Image (cartoon, grey):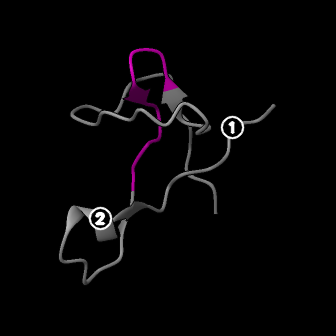
Amino acid sequence: MRIEKTDRNLSGVKCVVNTCYYHAEGDNCTAASIEIQPRNATSTDETDCATFTPALK
């Protein structure tokens, strides 16, 4: 299920993944919300943005 894309930056979230559908100028995220996985991660290397969707070409 795709998260809604808004016309506002998600406050407090910096995203440098410029191939994401939600990426905006200034390394901002325009998703209405984000989900970080997995639940039992023990380090930053184990985490992943589950909201990532490839940008439309």
Which amino acid is tagged 2? Asp
Residues 4 and 42: in front is 42
Q: In the rendered image of this protein, does residue 18 appear above or below residue 47?
A: above
In the figure, is residue 4 to the left or right of 31?
Answer: right
Q: In which image quadrant can residue 43 be found?
A: bottom left
- Counting from the top left corner in percent of width and height, residue 39 is at 29, 80
Q: Is residue 6 within the magenta segment?
A: no
For residue 55, the mark is 1
For residue 16, the mark is none
Which amino acid is tagged 1? Ala
The residue that mark 2 highlights is 45
Q: Residue at x 61, y 36 (%)?
A: 19
What range of the chain is rendered magenta?
24-34
- Counting from the top left corner in percent of width and height, residue 51 is at 50, 55
In the figure, is residue 30 to the left or right of 40?
Answer: right
Query: Which residue is at the far top?
Result: 25
Q: Is residue 28 within the magenta segment?
A: yes
Give the total number of marks visible in the rendering: 2
What type of secondary structure mainly makes up the magenta span? loop
Q: Residue at x 30, y 33 (%)?
A: 14
Q: Nearer the viewer, mark 2 or mark 1?
A: 2
- Counting from the top left corner in percent of width and height, residue 18 is at 54, 30
Q: Dot 1, how many residues are within 10 Å of its Cα: few (below 14), some (14-19), or many (20+)? A: few
- Counting from the top left corner in percent of width and height, residue 8 is at 42, 23
Q: Is residue 41 visible?
A: yes
